[in-house]
Amino acid sequence: MLPVHILGELAKPVSLSCRLFGNIFGEDTLIVVFVSATALLLKGVPVAARGTAHGGHSRALHDAPDADEHRAGADFSPPRDRCTST
């Protein structure tokens, strides 16, 4: 009986280590699954319906001039009003 008891005492830390690893890995896997499922569900929803997905800056980032155009010397000044005479 003593060898069985010693074997059980040695196997307990190994068993607990495997359970701990499984719990941590399972939690990470579930987080990835939930985030992926949410991304797939929201993929078909328009950005306006999702709220401020980019912190409210999505329009400003979309309208920003490209660096290549800026380097090329493109004129980004607003158009002048043609109705007034100056």
Image (cartoon, rainbow, N blue to C red):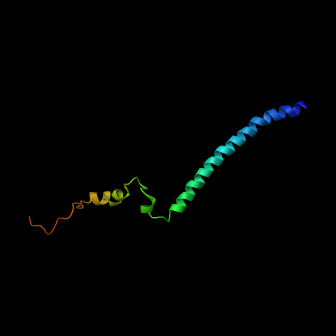
> What's the residue at 80%, 32% (across, down)?
9
77 left or right, relative to 54 = left
Q: Which residue ends up furthest to the right in the rendered image?
A: 1
Q: Which residue ends up furthest to the top in the rendered image?
A: 2
Judging depth in this view, the residue of 62 and 67 nearest the camera is 62
> What's the residue at 68%, 42% (across, down)?
21
Total numbered labels placed on residues in the image? 0
Q: Is residue 9 above or below residue 85?
A: above
9 left or right, relative to 31 = right
Q: Where the C terminus falls, by quadrant? A: bottom left
> What's the residue at 64%, 46% (across, down)?
25
Judging depth in this view, the residue of 2 and 39 nearest the camera is 39
> What's the residue at 33%, 57% (across, down)?
60
Q: Where the N terminus falls, by quadrant? A: top right
78 left or right, relative to 68 = left
What is the x, y in percent for residue 71? 27, 57
What is the x, y in percent for residue 74? 24, 61
Q: Quadrant of residue 50?
A: bottom left
What is the x, y in percent for residue 54? 41, 54
Judging depth in this view, the residue of 58 and 15 nearest the camera is 58
What is the x, y in percent for residue 45? 48, 64
Q: Which residue ends up furthest to the left in the rendered image?
A: 86
